[in-house]
Image: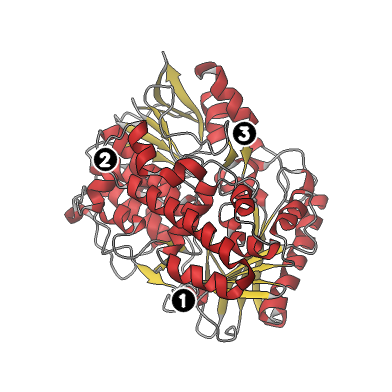
Amino acid sequence: MTDNRVWDAIVVGSGMGGLVCAAYLAAGGRRVLVVEQHDVAGGNSHVFRRRRAYEFDVGVHYLGDCGPGGFLPTVFGGLGLGGRVSFLEMDQDGFDEIVFPGVSMHVPAGWPRYRRRLKETLPRDAAGIDLFVDVCASLGAESYAMSLSDQDLTAAEQIRGAPTTFAWGRRPLTALFDHCALSPAARTLLAAQSPNYGMSPSQVTVSMHANVTDHYMRGAHYPKGGGQMLAAGLVEVLESHGGRLLTRSTVQRILVDGGRAVGVGLTDGRHFTAPLVVSNADYRRTVLDLVGDAHLPGPLVARARKATMALPLACLYVALDRPLPERRNANVWWYADDDVDASYQRVAEGDIDPVPLLFMSFASQRDPGSPNVCPPEHSNFQLMTLCPPGYGHWGLGAGPADGERYRRNDTYRKAKARLTEAMLRAAEGVVGPFRDDLVHLEAASPLTQERYTRSTGGTPYGLASWGRAGGRPDTRTPIDGLHVVGASTRYGTGVTGAALSGIICAGQILGRRLLPEVHAGRVLSDPDLLPERGAGWDALAVSRGAARRGGRGPARIG
């Protein structure tokens, strides 16, 4: 079965990279189809609801650089969404609280304040901290400037413009720690937020760590109304400019003919044709399954087979029928000891009971005015911890993306129950007892993540290694008309990194430097085409796509 409509571009997957790319292509005059296997668009930015009283974010817990001129406001503003997507400030004097034995520190926005706070917390490491912050702040500033450059720079010009990046960018974070002669406690304090990218100090490059840190040094925020607001706004741009979102539709194959992408084939037998395909699917699955090694150069296929993924997460979604004790609008990063390397080693070995680390994020504090988060005088928060790679820890040989049925597997259920109990024990040690007040508790394992996003190994962070150190694929591929976007590209991980991959990919296709254009104030879409939002407007319903919006929708709060 073939759709009779002629498409200029097909986007596989509706994570942040795919939706941003699709919206910019649509605003640029292309007829765009987005195909998504899940019930709603958004990838790791989507939400779900329980008991008609609570809404939980899957992956948007806090975002950096969302003040005026920040990357995400710039990306959304260039689509005419400045008045529809807004961001709430967290505590800029301490948006993250880092806690481990003998140390407690609130992380402030701004490199100067961060430097002072670090040295006040660990004065014996002051000299090493100065050196470390000098490198990371310089590297972050260089990357930021290069992202906004409207010039085609030669390799020599790039080196002159970013000397710190070229000196340190591809080296492991542990090399910088060693260079700065930092103590174990200082290393743990500086790398405490590393689960934001899912790699240990020995795995992650200085460039990725510095850029993620710089991202938050520009201010920590949360989208007003929750993560689904991001996806819903992008869907509105797509559909109002002639595009279409098709949910509950799984792409089985990216079709290639004569070295060119020509469309996609779905698991239900439908085919859609277009001279341009953008894959927001998991990068390894794109290469090895959706395209197949017959259409790609051998070295690229070999890199994809050997690639390793960032670590996956387990998450508990918690609701209480009482408020939490009054506290800052800040997340908590808790570690069982002061050796971050040992914590990652324990995770790698499957030793996660008791858990070596825990992230706590408090939705009912981040967006207290939202009617969807929880009822008045209730609490809504999430607990997360890193999990071992692969499926062995869960007693499985494969994951749900490969057809493995796991939810009733006894070994899996017992492992999940043990981890849930270990996470609850750790959390109560941080915020005090709360189990007597639980009204909702739901656990999501890496296999849950894989089921909904088809990410290899269930990680939300994409590739950890791909070829040489620090290497990641660009959005272009060797196949004419095929591009990739998302967390595995060289533009970074997380919501902002994925969004950057989307706008940069759209710019490559349209032959424009979109990011500096929209940063200077250019709006590509026609805001007059955007639909009105009435009293019953629902971001989750919008994110199902127009074709399914009129049917039985997602549960509403209240």
Residue at 45 percent of width and 53 percent of height: 495
User: Could you tell me if the residues under marks 3 and 1 are in contact, i.e. CB atoms within 8 Å?
Assistant: no
- Which residue is under mark 3? 307
Q: Position of residue 354 (x, y in %)?
A: 79, 64
The kind of residue tagged 3 is Ala
Circle 1 crowding by C-alpha within 10 Å: few under 14, some 14–19, many from 20: some
535 or 161, nearer to the observer: 161
Q: Position of residue 226 (x, y in %)?
A: 44, 65
Marks 3 and 1 sit apart, C-alpha to C-alpha, by: 39 Å
15 or 509, nearer to the observer: 509
Labels 1, 2: front one: 1
Where disc 1 sits, the SS reads loop
Residue at 33 percent of width and 36 percent of height: 157
Circle 3 crowding by C-alpha within 10 Å: few under 14, some 14–19, many from 20: some
The label on residue 93 is 1
Q: Position of residue 389 (x, y in %)?
A: 70, 45
Comes first in the chain, label 2 or label 3: 3
Comes first in the chain, label 3 or label 1: 1
- Which residue is under mark 2? 513
Q: Which quarter of the rendering shows the N terminus?
A: top left
Marks 2 and 3 sit apart, C-alpha to C-alpha, by: 30 Å
Circle 2 crowding by C-alpha within 10 Å: few under 14, some 14–19, many from 20: many
The kind of residue tagged 2 is Arg
